[in-house]
Image: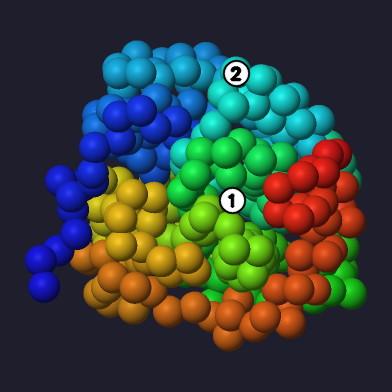
Amino acid sequence: MTAWTADRIPDQTGRVAVVTGANSGLGLVTATELARRGAHVVLAVRDTAAGEEAARRIGGDVEVRELDLASLTSVRAFADGLTADHPAIDLLVNNAGVVLLGPRRTSADGFELQLGTNALGPFALTGLLLDVLIAAGRARVVTLSSITHKRAHLDFDDLMFERDYGASAAYGRSKLAITVLGLELDRRLRAAGSAVVATLAHPGITRTNLTPRAWEHLGRRGKVLARVGLLMAQPLEQGALPQLRAATDPQARGGQFFGPAALGETRGRVTEAKLGREAADPEIGRRLWAEAQRLTGVSYLGLGAGNHL
């Protein structure tokens, strides 16, 4: 079977694409490839100066807008401004994320910071943009997962990790949460008969600025693993292919999950990836969806109306 590469991305002319965290790493590669094929790309970034520099590097039809996923106020302001200027959005790539080490930290809204940034912020953003995604016709929402979601666990009695906090475990929990929510979004879209398609992807082990941080909590052993990880890691351009396929492959189905094929899904050509047990559990999906709505105040009523903070 011929490997899926960026050369297979269809023409994106006339489409409006939003990529979160687009000023660096996987987001920058994704935004660049979409713009190269004619899309109008919104770089949704926390640091607008970095975003403007990225826009200059990308060229093409791009704009920069401020978005801090760790703040529901910022998410609402971004969504309000974007929908006022763009009544239809064809693609939302929920790429942005954080990896934090050290002691537990909280977001502006009091959430454990990794869960707030990596899961609850994107959940709120997607809900607030859902009407304009529906207005575009066959729009697509891409959720960026992580291979770490497979060994993570959601403790609904301590979702914010207030007890026995571990930064690495909290990161895995946040990526499991966004994976669960992405799959539940697909179920709900299909149940509503919506034309919006929700897909998921993970980059395996890719050489981003987050790669060394994943191991630092292990001290000296972590430094060794980080060096080995960097040697094993894929280039950014390869690591971005799963989310680019999830975003643009005309044959992609709702709920389909893409990732690397080789060495335990850490690298290699793009294939359909395997989900962790908790991620694929519909009951966990329903429970976390309800909790995410309660925590963020964003309600996907009818999957197209009433989405307000």
State yes or no: discs 1 and 2 in contact (Cβ < 8 Å).
no
| Residue 123: x %, y % from top left | 69, 51
User: For the point 60% across and 18% down, which residue is it?
Assistant: 85
Q: Quadrant of the C terminus?
A: top right
Identify the element where label 1 is drawn. Answer: loop
**In the displayed structure, does residue 262 sit left or right of residue 171?**
left
| Residue 293: x %, y % from top left | 83, 56
216 over 20 or under it: above or below: below
Dot 2: within a 10 Å radius of its alpha carbon, few (fewer than 14), some, or many (20 or more) residues? few
Circle number at residue 85: 2
116 over 68 or under it: above or below: below
Q: Earlier in the sequence, mark 1 or mark 2?
A: 2
**In the displayed structure, does residue 61 sit left or right of residue 16?**
left
Location of residue 294 (image quadrant): bottom right
Task: Find the residue positioned furthest to the left.
Answer: 2
Camera sees residue 211: yes
264 over 249 or under it: above or below: below
Q: How is the image coloured?
A: rainbow
Location of residue 169 (image quadrant): bottom right
Residue under pointer 1: 99
User: For the point 76% across and 73% down, which residue is it?
Assistant: 286
User: For the point 77% across and 68% down, which residue is it?
Assistant: 288
Q: Quadrant of the N terminus?
A: bottom left
Circle number at residue 287: none
Foreground tag (1 vs 2):
2
Dot 1: within a 10 Å radius of its alpha carbon, few (fewer than 14), some, or many (20 or more) residues? some
Which residue type does callout 2 highlight? Answer: Asp
